[in-house]
Amino acid sequence: MKRYIVPSFAALTLMALPLCAGNIVNNGSFETGDFTGWTTGGTFEDTQVVSGGYYVFSGAEDGTYYATLGPVGSDGTLSQTLSDSLGVSYTFSFWLSAVGDSPSDFSAYWNGTQLLSVTNPNTGNVWTQYSYGVTGTGSDTITLSFRDDPSYIALDNISVASSSGVPEPATFGLLAGGLIALALRRRRA
């Protein structure tokens, strides 16, 4: 008779938790080499996805590609609507690199609520992370607004990930399927 070791429900839950921590932003590091997954708006001239060194930037914070944001005269925007879980706590974060050009500005919004607004942002030309705790409503929109008349602001590694330890619905589905498979396998033994 074969003996199977069946992990406990708690062990299976702990194994599944990393699945819930994944980034739900589509193309958050621009690794498609373009703005796939994003809605662009406003003044979008002089805004592109690049790799390697560009202007004063030495390269991406994450992966190969990053965005350089340089609309002149008025702001451009990037936005994305996310499917998330109602009431779940998330961390919305992104990385900026800027040299304090004037005039320039950068703002970040969660469902129209402003989380960040900086004029002439200056990170000393190093990648700097900005993070905010937000709560999911089931469908949430992130919007980034920017302008840099004389040059560029660099943007990379935009992420919205569960910070509450509560698995996403898809994780529950995977966990339930695994438990059913284990129960059927154990029944056959």
Image (tube, grey):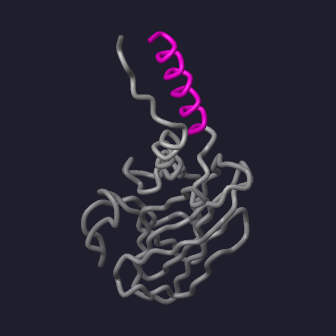
Quadrant occupied by the N terminus? top left
Q: Position of residue 166 (x, y in %)?
A: 61, 51
- Work out which quarter of the rendered image holds the C terminus and state it: top left
Which residue is depicted at the point 69% across and 61% down? Answer: 135
Which is more toward the observer, 64 or 50? 64
| Magenta-span inclusion, residue 172 | yes
Q: Residue at x 60, y 37 (%)?
A: 172
Report the span colored magenta. Answer: 170-189
Q: Is residue 73 left or right of residue 66?
A: right
The number of numbered discs placed on residues in the rendered structure image is 0
* Residue sitting nearer the eye, 23 or 1: 1
Q: Quadrant of residue 145?
A: bottom right
Q: In the rendered structure, does residue 14 fall within the stretch colored magenta? A: no
Does 100 sit left or right of 84 as displayed?
A: left
Against 43, residue 122 (above or below) is below
User: Vertical placement of 153 versus 8: above or below?
Assistant: below
> Majority secondary structure of the magenta segment?
helix
Q: Could you say which is closer to the camera, residue 93 or residue 58?
A: 93
Q: Position of residue 63 (x, y in %)?
A: 31, 57
Q: Is residue 164 left or right of residue 3?
A: right
> Could you say which quadrant of the image residue 74 lies in?
bottom right
Identify the residue at image location x=47%, y=10%: 188
Residue 30 image offset from top left, x and y in percent: 41, 54
Residue that extends furthest to the front in the rendered view of this protein: 1
Residue drawn at the location 34% of the way across and 58% of the way down: 65
Q: Horizontal and vertical percent for residue 81?
A: 65, 51
